[in-house]
Image (cartoon, rainbow, N blue to C red):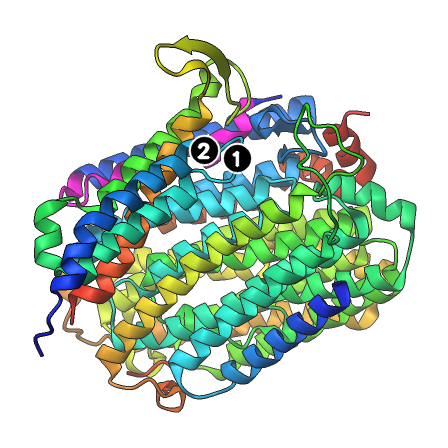
């Protein structure tokens, strides 16, 4: 059955960017406020799922030509690498370092290695969620 | 602080992730996983050596001090189990190269095996009860994938039951941790022990102890909770069965041992008596199963259950000697179960069946396989001077010394019946008139035999070297018998 | 509040048990989902339900909330999310392969096809 999804598709084109922007906000808000890699990643994959609903798997694959299992692997590598980095400074695994820096535009900013770890988590969550949804969705 | 502790967990983890990038290139996958397995063995050997020389090693993850952060603790027992796990993992991987088949190799077989090792080594090493749950889940997730990988009908059917049982037991684990947390307000195992001894024996603690026994008993396959095991372990191919049989149930057994020696020792009259009764029942149930079947896989699978019973019987007596015996037997059993599963894997490759009625006369064509199998079965039954003997001797002797006559007698009888059940495979499968089997020509028997042969050599050395290994094992048992050693090492008072 | 939570958790466990005892595979999976929800709420309740400031350095407040149960259930939720998703995929594959989601038909005799 062919449904008329013009409204959904048009709305998606706008809402998609709002959701992704909000997920990026959530991602950076983590550590001090509610948010972080996991919830940000879920929100981003929510956006991609919306895209899947509005269009179809082929179109989405054209827009985002990733092998999501590789995305998981890259995310894990970043996360584990950040944790293992501490070993080279003879600190326990996962010890995180931070500093404060004055960046242009942003002013006084705290820089954490935890952000790198969270980037890994972000990618893993997107990868896992999308793998699951594609596995179930593809065979229909 | 010692970063060596994390290496047996970190190396397989990184390997597993890196291997995901090489799914197309099977040779690269094999080489990388073999090299990393060797590195893991070296790292865990160095760790065991260090623990033996300098006492318990600890490491506070992300540099949060002991009761607040997650602590990894490697005492002698953990270090030995990690070492054994690494060796078995290497053997199973080596065996897989020629037997698991390209389809599985392309579908993330090697990464998942590596993740399984992460979970097992992590569970042996962690000193935090919730982190134990997390490593349990890492291990279980990998085992779900391994059990279903290949997607044959029987695998799909059995994996559903396996996953269901484990999801329920994981929920129970969370509930048990919740109760424990509400009573003691901490998750660090050493700290829990301190807080619990301040409380002494209260009814609620006994309830929590029994709840933990149910949780770990489901994973470790003790008496009324082993029902899922024979069906589930039957489904996957031989190297996966070897990993499951040697490692997964032993993690449950290890967790019972750890919790029942480190902190649930206040109401021994109830909890340990219950554990002992269940252990004896487990032995009986396992022996009945092992004798009843004529399927070689089933026979070995039921022998896992017997071994779990013997180890836990030793733990429940809770004297230094019985604990030494249990640890001796635990390490022996991990090694010998892996060996036996790999060996019957070869038989199945040759004959194409696991039904004993359809196999006979193998020793004519495969004398090396036959005699390796013979030595392995003798070691399993605990015939001196092979590896099962010392552990069983100590468990039985301390059973008689503490006047647990029935239990000790059941353990003794079980050796005899275990020997009978596996000798049956030898007599009916290897003796008799040779038959022709259709897969015979293509079977790479020589290659497959390498890994179990090496493990059998370990079993023999372990038996003959009992005298030399004894001080190491008794150090491990000493830590279990005196929780203060563990507590002081972790909390550094 | 704790009493109310205890009732809620009890109802969740009850429903989960009922669903898991049914024959349809999908109901069983929903049952496991409810069971883990119950377990997570139990974990949260067992930590003690109280109001208080976030336990961060530099915060000054008369009472602090216990951060640990929240961290624990977050971990447990992520794990059960992963397991449930995997379980669903396996169940779907099994349905395709075996042509049934009735547990009675999945019984199978002792390891035979």
Q: Quadrant of residue B492?
A: top right
Extent of the magenta region: B3-27
Q: Nearer the viewer, residue A29 or B282?
A: A29
**Residue at the spot 72% in from the left edge and 31% down from the top edge:** B490
User: Is residue B442 one of those drawn in magenta?
Assistant: no
Say whether residue B328 is left or right of residue A40: right
Q: Nearer the viewer, residue C72 or A15?
A: A15
Q: Is residue B42 visible?
A: yes
Residue located farthest toward the bottom when viewing the structure as drawn: C104
Say whether residue B238 is left or right of residue B30: right
Residue B61: percent from the left, percent from the top? 58, 29
* Residue where numbered disc 1 is placed: A33
Q: Chain of mark 1?
A: A
Q: Residues within 10 Å of mark 1 (few under 14, many from 20)?
A: few
Q: Nearer the viewer, residue A12 or B221?
A: A12
Say whether residue B64 is left or right of residue B259: left
**Residue B98 numbered mark, or none:** none
**For the residues marked 2 and 1, what is the alpha-carbon distance in whole angstroms?**
6 Å
For label 2, the SS is helix
Say whether residue B163 is left or right of residue B104: right
**Residue A29 numbered mark, or none:** 2
For label 1, the SS is loop
């Amino acid at each position: 059955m062919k449904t008329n999804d013009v409204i959904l598709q048009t709305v998606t084109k706008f809402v998609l960017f709002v959701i992704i922007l909000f997920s990026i906000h959530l991602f950076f808000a983590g550590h001090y406020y509610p948010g972080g890699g996991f919830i940000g990643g879920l929100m981003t994959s929510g956006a991609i799922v919306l895209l899947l609903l509005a269009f179809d798997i082929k179109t989405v694959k054209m827009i985002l030509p990733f092998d999501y299992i590789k995305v998981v692997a890259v995310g894990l590598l970043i996360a584990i690498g950040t944790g293992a980095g501490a070993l080279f400074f003879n600190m326990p695994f996962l010890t995180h370092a931070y500093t404060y820096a004055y960046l242009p535009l942003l002013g006084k900013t705290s820089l954490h290695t935890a952000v790198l770890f969270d980037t890994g988590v972000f990618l893993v969550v997107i990868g896992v969620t999308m793998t699951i949804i594609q596995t179930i969705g593809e065979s229909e | 602080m010692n970063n060596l502790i994390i290496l047996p967990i970190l190396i397989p983890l990184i390997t597993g992730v890196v291997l995901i990038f090489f799914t197309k290139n099977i040779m690269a996958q094999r080489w990388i996983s073999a090299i990393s397995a060797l590195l893991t063995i070296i790292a865990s050997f160095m760790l065991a050596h260090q623990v033996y020389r300098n006492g318990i090693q600890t490491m506070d993850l992300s540099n949060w001090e002991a009761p607040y952060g997650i602590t990894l603790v490697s005492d002698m027992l953990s270090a030995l189990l990690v070492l054994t796990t690494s060796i078995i993992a290497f053997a199973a991987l080596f065996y897989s190269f020629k037997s698991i088949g390209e389809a599985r190799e392309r579908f993330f077989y090697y990464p998942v095996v590596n993740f399984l090792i992460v979970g097992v080594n992590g569970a042996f090493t962690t000193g935090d009860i919730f982190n134990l749950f997390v490593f349990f889940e890492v291990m279980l997730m990998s085992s779900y994938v391994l059990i279903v990988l290949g997607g044959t009908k029987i695998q799909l059917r059995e994996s559903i039951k396996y996953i269901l049982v484990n999801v329920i037991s994981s929920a129970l684990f969370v509930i048990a941790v919740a109760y424990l947390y509400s009573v003691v307000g901490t998750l660090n195992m050493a700290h829990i022990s301190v807080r619990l001894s301040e409380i002494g024996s209260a009814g609620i603690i006994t309830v929590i102890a029994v709840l933990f026994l149910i949780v770990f008993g489901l994973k470790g396959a003790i008496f009324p909770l082993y029902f899922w095991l024979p069906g589930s372990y039957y489904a996957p191919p031989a190297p996966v069965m070897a990993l499951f049989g040697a490692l997964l149930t032993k993690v449950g057994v290890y967790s019972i041992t750890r919790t029942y020696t480190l902190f649930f020792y206040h109401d021994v009259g109830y909890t340990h008596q219950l554990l002992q009764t269940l252990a004896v029942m487990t032995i009986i149930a396992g022996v009945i199963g092992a004798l009843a079947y004529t399927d070689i896989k089933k026979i070995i699978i039921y022998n896992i259950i017997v071994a779990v019973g013997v180890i836990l019987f030793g733990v429940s007596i809770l004297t230094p000697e019985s604990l030494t015996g249990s640890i001796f037997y635990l390490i022996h059993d991990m090694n010998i179960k892996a060996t036996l599963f790999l060996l019957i894997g070869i038989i199945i490759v040759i004959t194409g069946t696991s039904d004993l009625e359809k196999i006979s006369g193998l020793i004519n064509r495969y004398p090396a396989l036959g005699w390796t199998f013979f030595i392995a079965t003798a070691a399993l039954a605990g015939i001196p001077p092979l590896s099962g003997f010392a552990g069983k001797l100590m468990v039985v002797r301390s059973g008689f010394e503490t006047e647990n006559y029935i239990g000790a007698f059941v353990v003794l009888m079980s050796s005899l019946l275990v020997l009978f059940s596996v000798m049956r495979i030898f007599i009916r499968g290897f003796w008799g008139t040779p038959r022709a089997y259709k897969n015979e020509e293509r079977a790479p028997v020589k290659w497959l035999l390498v890994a179990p042969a090496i493990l059998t050599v370990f079993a023999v050395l372990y038996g003959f070297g009992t005298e030399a290994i004894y001080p190491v094992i008794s150090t491990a048992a000493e830590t279990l018998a005196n929780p203060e050693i563990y507590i002081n090492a972790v909390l550094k008072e | 509040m704790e009493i109310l939570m205890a009732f809620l958790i009890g109802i969740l466990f009850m429903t989960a048990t009922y669903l898991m005892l049914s024959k349809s595979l999908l109901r069983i999976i929903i049952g496991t989902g409810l069971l883990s929800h119950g377990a997570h709420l139990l974990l949260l309740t067992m930590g003690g339900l109280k109001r208080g400031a976030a336990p961060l350095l530099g915060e000054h407040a008369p009472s602090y909330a216990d951060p640990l149960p929240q961290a624990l259930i977050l971990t447990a939720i992520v794990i059960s999310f992963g397991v449930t998703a995997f379980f669903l995929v396996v169940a779907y594959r099994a349905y395709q392969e075996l042509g049934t989601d009735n547990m009675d038909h999945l019984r199978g005799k002792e390891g035979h096809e």
